Image (cartoon, helix red, strand yellow):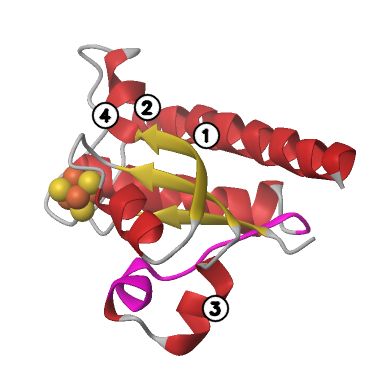
Amino acid sequence: MSKVKVIACSGIGKVFGLMTREATLQVTNNLQPEKAETVCLAHVVTGEADATAKVKGCTCITVDGCPALCSAKSVEHAGGIVKAKFRSVDEMRNHRGVDAGSATALTEDGWKIVDEFAEKIAAKVTELVEEEQNNG
Ligand code: SF4
């Protein structure tokens, strides 16, 4: 099977967007490099051929900053099969009152939250790969 696509939103003005990108990169670069890869959401949105081919009909996990779910909606629109939708705003609900950082830099606590977040996404990658192997 092809690698699971983990696709972060493009949130730029708040810490939530930074968290989606850092968590996604941790999954695809460090935790699950054999089973997962990322795709640039902007390329998915603009219909760039390589990005569209990677997403269409493929198992995807989206990582959004907020309930607008820009990644989930765009990936579905491009024909991706979104099996799980994560939101960094939900992670922050589990850490009320913690200063995770700003739109451009995470605090030490922010990195810990991102680490936990990435572990959850990585576990979902494993689950989806096993599911496909059992069905395949
Ligand atoms: S999901 Fe929210 S944070 Fe992410 S790009 Fe959309 S509006 Fe911005």
Residue ID for mark 1: 115
Q: Which mark is residue 53?
A: 3
**Crowd tier of the residue under label 1, counting other residues whose Cα lies within 10 Å: few below 14, some 14–19, many 20 or above:** some
Residue 29 is a magenta residue: no
Foreground disc of the pair 1, 4? 4
Residue 39 is a magenta residue: yes
Q: Nearer the viewer, residue 107 or 36?
A: 36
Earlier in the chain: of badge 1 and badge 4, it is 4
Secondary structure at badge 1 equals helix
Residue ID for mark 4: 89
For marks 4 and 3, give the CA distance: 29 Å
**Residue visible at 52% across and 27% down in the picture:** 116
Q: Is residue 39 left or right of residue 17?
A: right
The magenta stretch is: 34-45
Q: Is mark 1 within 8 Å of ligand 1?
A: no
What x and y, as percent, mark residue 115?
Answer: 52, 34
Q: Is mark 3 within 8 Å of ligand 1?
A: no
Residue ID for mark 2: 109
**Residue visible at 67% across and 32% down in the picture:** 123
